[in-house]
Amino acid sequence: MWGPLAVALATPLLFLQAAVVKPMTAELDRMQRQVSRLEATIAELKSKAPAARQATGLLAELSQQESLLSAAERSLERFARLDRKLSRGLDDAEHAIAKLDRLDAFSDRVRQKARLLDATS
């Protein structure tokens, strides 16, 4: 009499153990392992935070240097244009000086001829 009752009571408990408790225990173990891995990953990321801040600082500095480089390139382009203008101006000035020298020589010759004419008259 107790045997069938024990079987009747034990069967649902065994079914409950096999169908619910074991899978839930396995799932909880799996979740605990995931949480542990997640905590380890978070700790690793926290330990890398100073390096990340430093990298961010380096990136900001690199960006600033890029801006400075662009400004320097623009300045060099302006200096190159100015140099070309100055070279053209220098060439023009040299031509003007040469013309003034020729004009001065011509003026000297005219004065000499005028003196000769005055002297002969």
Image (spheres, rainbow, N blue to C red):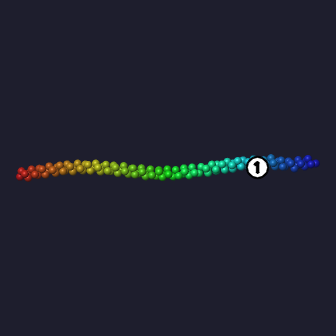
Apparent side of residue 22 relative to residue 64 in the rendered image (left or right): right
What is the count of numbered marks? 1
Q: Residue 66 or 47: which is nearer the viewer? A: 47
Q: Residue 31 or 46: which is nearer the viewer? A: 46
Say which residue appears at 12% left-offset and 50% top-offset.
112
Crowd class of label 1 (few under 14; some 14 to 19; many from 20; radius 10 Å): few
Say which residue appears at 45% left-offset and 52% top-offset.
68
Q: Position of residue 76 (x, y in %)?
A: 39, 50
Q: Residue 28 or 4: which is nearer the viewer? A: 28
Apparent side of residue 105 relative to residue 38 in the rendered image (left or right): left
Say which residue appears at 9% left-offset and 50% top-offset.
116
Say which residue appears at 38% left-offset and 51% top-offset.
78
Type of residue at label 1?
Met
Residue to which mark 1 is pinned: 24
Q: Position of residue 10 (x, y in %)?
A: 86, 48
Q: In the displayed orientation, state which residue is furthest to the right.
A: 1
Apparent side of residue 100 relative to residue 47 in the rendered image (left or right): left
Helix, strand or loop at disc 1? helix
Q: Position of residue 4 (x, y in %)?
A: 91, 47
